């Protein structure tokens, strides 16, 4: 699991190590220089003779870059440092000067951004150390202009330079993932001690590139201090929570999921939700719907059962128009039944409108909402927190946490990076999918996957009176997002980073789910 901690938690964890004389900056500089060397070699370049530009602000990040630049210069690199802070780190500056790094006082230039771009055109690697984790809000002049000009220059370059960010790309919201102003996108971010929330949370996470965490010895102090602010599950974490049948189990012990989905107008949503559930691996699906989607579900999935009976979790809402009075009443009945029994429930699409008033003022965390940005904006606005889709997309972490606090439910916000929040505990941020997953019906499949996972734990969650399983629904929602994303990659022929992939449909994703589950188990 990747764990991200706030800037305040990192500073608190560093204090005892610094007091004990631990050389944290030297370790950071060594790791940074090693990464720059690896990037040069990865492009087929020799390290001696390569040109590196350091973008140096004030503070410790600038010191890290200067000390790393000194190491690179001693290895034969032509290292230039654009000094963009009023007071560069003194020890770093001295080490860089002694090693032969060429220092440029660009703040004295009448056009600072143009001066930096002129230096950048000569370099194959740019090291972004303009600001550190203590910065708040957008970059200020002249750094904002420098970042914007360099981003433009990089995009226009036929042979794009490698951008290595120190700790975080300068200008992102370190603790919330916001992008309040210009940012130079990184190919790789070398982050010190622990990941920072902004490296995992959208929209900033899209600008961080590959994130590499440098071990500075903070694990002990961090474990003893504040809990992580954001987590990202890896395959091994999902394997730890995935319900795997044991010898002697039968369909009722493996989990029974009730699916209330589809309509005469949108019958396919029922097929997709049922497909997602069945291919994830559970004992039985009980489908509840009108004639047309029922016929389609039976034709595609003869193992689905339409007879009423006990269920251990529910999925309500995919493909249902809340304006259909009869179906809206059915959704309300199933939600009420689930709340009475303590059954975990996924509310998706049309079912989200059931929460637009205060009929359900305080839901349990075992109810999981799965909106996209527009649906979340509508829900929050209906509950008195006026907002827009654009505002949610600009600050998803804040809005998903707010929705969890207002409703009491666990909230999974769908997107290129899926963000999950419970009323308490860390956020989860999963970026496991491919852009090809942005296709109609993919969310219906995800609802089925999540419902199946919840059904596997349904009896335990329903009987949990002391809160032993309090954080499990959010963890399962993140696990569902990971497997759903991996299935999309497999379906698109895009198993690893850098593979272009190919178009997929939602049914392709559902059919790839068994292979995705196998990949984590």
Image (spheres, grey):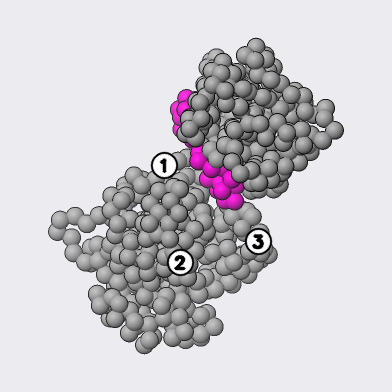
Percent of width and height locating residue 106: 77, 28
**Position of 51 relative to 262 (above/below):** above
- State the CA–CA distance, disc 2 to disc 1: 25 Å
Residue closest to the far top: 98
Q: Is residue 464 visible?
A: yes
Label 3 crowding class (10 Å Cα cut-off): few <14, some 14-19, many 20+? Answer: few
Q: Nearer the viewer, mark 2 or mark 1?
A: 2
Tell whether 118 sits left or right of 50: right
Q: Which residue is mark 2?
A: 443
**Residue drawn at x 47%, y 51% as measured from the top left:** 431
Range drawn in magenta: 196-224
Q: Nearer the viewer, residue 472 or 181?
A: 181
Snapshot quadrant of residue 152: top right
Residue 219 lies within the magenta run: yes
Q: Which residue is mark 1?
A: 1
| Depth check, front residue: 110 or 184 | 110
265 in relation to 472, above or below = below
Residue 390's disc number: 3
Label 3: state its secondary structure: helix
x%, y% of residue 29?
56, 23
| Marked residue nearer the N-terminal end (2 or 3) | 3
Q: Which quadrant holds the N terminus?
A: top left
Per the model, the C-alpha gap separating discs 2 and 3 is 20 Å
């Amino acid at each position: 699991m990747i764990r991200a901690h706030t800037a305040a938690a990192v500073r608190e964890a560093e204090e005892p190590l610094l007091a004990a004389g631990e050389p944290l900056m030297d370790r950071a500089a060594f790791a940074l220089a090693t990464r720059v060397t690896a990037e040069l070699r990865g492009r087929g370049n020799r390290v001696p003779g390569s040109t590196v530009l350091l973008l140096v602000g004030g503070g410790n990040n600038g010191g890290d870059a200067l000390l790393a630049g000194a190491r690179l210069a001693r290895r034969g690199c032509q290292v230039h440092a654009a000094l963009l802070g009023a007071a560069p780190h003194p020890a770093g500056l001295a080490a860089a000067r002694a090693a032969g790094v060429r220092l440029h006082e660009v703040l004295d230039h009448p056009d600072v951004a143009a001066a930096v771009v002129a230096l950048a055109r000569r370099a194959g690697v740019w090291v972004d150390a303009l600001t550190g984790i203590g910065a708040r809000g957008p970059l200020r002049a002249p750094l904002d202009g420098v970042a914007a000009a360099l981003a433009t220059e990089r995009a226009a370059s036929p042979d794009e330079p490698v951008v290595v960010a120190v700790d975080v790309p300068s200008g992102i919201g370190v603790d919330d993932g916001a992008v309040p102003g210009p940012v130079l996108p990184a190919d790789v971010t070398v982050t010190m001690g622990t990941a920072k929330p902004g490296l995992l949370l959208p929209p900033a996470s899209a600008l961080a590139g590959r994130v590499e965490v440098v071990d500075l010895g903070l694990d002990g102090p961090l474990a003893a201090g504040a809990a992580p602010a954001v987590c990202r599950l890896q395959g091994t974490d999902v394997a730890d929570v995935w319900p795997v049948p044991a010898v002697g189990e039968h369909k009722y012990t493996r989990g029974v999921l009730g699916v209330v989905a589809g309509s005469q107008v949108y019958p396919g949503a029922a097929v997709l939700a049922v497909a997602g559930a069945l291919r994830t691996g559970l004992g039985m699906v009980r489908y509840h719907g009108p004639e047309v989607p029922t016929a389609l579900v039976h034709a595609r999935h003869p193992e689905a059962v339409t007879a009423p009976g006990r269920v251990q979790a529910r999925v309500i809402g995919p493909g249902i128009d809340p304006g259909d009075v009869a179906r809206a009443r059915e959704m309300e009945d199933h939600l009420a039944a689930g709340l009475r029994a303590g059954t975990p429930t996924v509310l998706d699409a049309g079912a989200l409108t059931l929460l637009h008033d205060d009929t359900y003022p305080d839901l349990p965390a075992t109810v999981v909402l799965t909106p996209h940005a527009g649906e979340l904006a509508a829900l929050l606005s209906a509950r008195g927190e006026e907002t827009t889709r654009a505002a949610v997309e600009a600050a998803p972490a804040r809005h998903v946490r707010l929705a969890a606090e207002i409703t009491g439910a666990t909230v999974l916000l769908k997107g290129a990076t899926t963000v999950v929040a419970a009323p308490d505990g860390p956020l989860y941020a999963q970026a496991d999918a491919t852009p090809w997953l942005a296709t109609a019906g993919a969310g219906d499949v995800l609802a089925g996957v999540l419902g199946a996972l919840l059904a596997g734990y349904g009896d335990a969650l329903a009987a949990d009176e002391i809160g032993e399983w309090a954080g499990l629904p959010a963890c399962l929602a993140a696990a569902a997002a990971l497997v759903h994303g991996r299935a999309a990659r497999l379906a698109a022929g895009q198993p690893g980073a850098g593979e272009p992939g190919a178009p997929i449909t939602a049914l392709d994703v559902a059919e790839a789910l068994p292979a995705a589950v196998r990949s984590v188990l």
